[in-house]
Amino acid sequence: MRLRRLEEEFGDGLDVGVRSFLLRPYPDPGRTLDQFRTYTQSWLRPAAQPDAPTFRVWTSDAGPPSHSVPPHLVAKAAATLGPAAFRDVDERLMRAYFADSRDITDPATLRAIWREARLPDEAFARVADDALLRETIAQHNQALEAGVTGVPAIRMEGREGLVVGAQPIETYRRWIEHALSDA
């Protein structure tokens, strides 16, 4: 959420857009819960950064999450209701996954997150919209073509290069200030 803080700091000088990049584009039926728990220990490195959101090693017996598509579709469905709905659902998905050990590929968990955001129940059906799936896949493929290898991956419109991986807020701030001074 560092970029959201910077968006507030820079006001109209910064417009953050979010696009899909699927870390796990396909279900992996062979990944065990124990393997996933071991993987989540890697979250402790970004968790140690001073302004990091909450990251915890997976403690639940739910999961492991199967693939990245379901939560992306829920976020895109929320975005059809407006930027505030997207942000609320996006933050809830992140917290559910990284802090609360909730399987965000489980349909019941995704519906619960939707309800926790107090979004209209009938609008949840948008998750099944083929257009949202096509958009998600297209954005993922565009990210691959641009050289994205992980998340977050930050790119400035009209500029070459990417910043990949969680960086300290000061790194992003300097990058933005430099770009704005060039404009």
Image: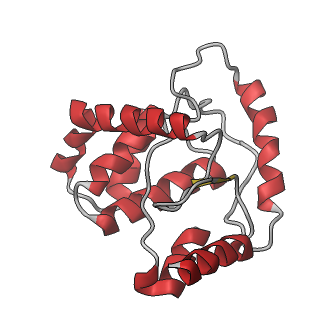
Q: Position of residue 10 (x, y in %)?
A: 51, 85
Which corner quadrant holds the N terminus?
Answer: bottom right
Q: Is residue 16 above or below residue 37?
A: below
**Residue closest to the eye, 140 or 111:** 140
Q: Is residue 121 above or below residue 116?
A: above
Q: Position of residue 31 (x, y in %)?
A: 67, 19
- Residue under the image location 16 percent in, 47 percent down: 122
Q: Position of residue 14 (x, y in %)?
A: 46, 76
- Residue under the image location 41 percent in, 64 percent down: 87
**Total marks placed:** 0
- Residue under the image location 26 percent in, 59 percent down: 119
Tell me the colour scheme of the image: secondary structure
Tell me if 23 is positioned left or right of 38 in this view: left
Q: Is residue 62 above or below residue 28?
A: below
- Residue under the image location 69 percent in, 73 percent down: 169
Examine the rendering and report whether any part of residue 108 can be seen: no
